[in-house]
Amino acid sequence: MYSANKRSLLIFSIMTTAVLAAAAALALWNGGEALPAASTAAVPVSGGDWGLSFPTQGEPPSGNASPEELAKYDAYYLGNTTQKVIYLTFDCGYENGNTEQILDALKKHHAPAAFFVVGHMIESAPDIVRRMADEGHVVGNHTFHHPDMSSISQKEAFQQELDSLADLYQQTTGKPLSHFYRPPQGKYSEENLKQAQELGYKTVFWSLAYVDWNTDSQPSPEQAYAKLLPRIHDGAIVLLHSTSRTNAEILDDLLSKWEAMGYTFRSLNDLP
């Protein structure tokens, strides 16, 4: 059992690192300089790897698809951009000792968050998943096995990944899983968005992330702040990884810094 779990962690880490590195290559930021201004026209949904560009510091970024096009499928990458609010989300593939410190910081700041979990997280750390639920956080569906969902064309197979995770969560916590879905590795297709919508899910991408997933090469607090503070914006859906030691160490101070900038924290349940 131990070796099987280790293999699962290795596969998850490799898949996540490869995809998010590709997303970083889409130039979220270029040496601290703003990227060329993106078009304000509605960008259609085409699928692929979710990516962002930040044409203006402190303003919402442009995504692979526009908020208006994503809204047709109950999908989001931004929240309410008319208010200084932040929606905190964490992707949870496995537990390596950092999640409880993250939960402690959230509790201290009375900050709601969303934790997108996979089957391994629930199986290996049920007490922590129960704590997420008991403390009022959204627990979302990141699929059972964390596959590339954009490669799944049959609705039955797509649904099985979501239903299996929801069933395990119900058995573990005695509560229904929330109907928020985050595509593993940020890979999606227009058909996936339709399938999730038909199953009653809201698909949640992100408008701010940084290179925090490589547990063997964690950024310093200063490097993390250099990415997370200048890019924060009204209505930001922030993606962090619960496996990050840096995130666990800085979260209390990071939330304080964002609060000092005038931001408050909202649940995904408050999305417009």
Image (cartoon, grey):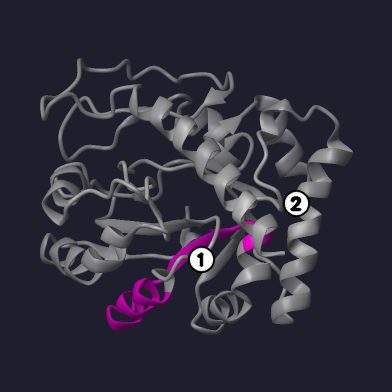
**Which residues fall within the magenta stretch?**
100-120
Residue assigned mark 2:
162
In the displayed structure, would residue 140 be above or below residue 77?
Answer: below
Q: Amino acid at mark 2?
A: Leu
Q: Residue at x 40, y 49 (%)?
A: 79
Q: Position of residue 42 (x, y in %)?
A: 44, 20
Residue 95 is labelled as: 1
Q: Residue at x 42, y 43 (%)?
A: 206
The residues bearing labels 2 and 1 have C-alpha atoms spaced at a distance of 20 Å
Q: Nearer the viewer, residue 92 or 107?
A: 92
Judge left or right: residue 146 versus residue 43: right
In the displayed structure, would residue 255 be above or below residue 212?
Answer: below
Q: Quadrant of the N terminus?
A: bottom right
Residue 185 location, quadrant? top right
- Secondary structure beneath dot 1 equals loop
In the displayed structure, would residue 156 be above or below residue 271?
Answer: above
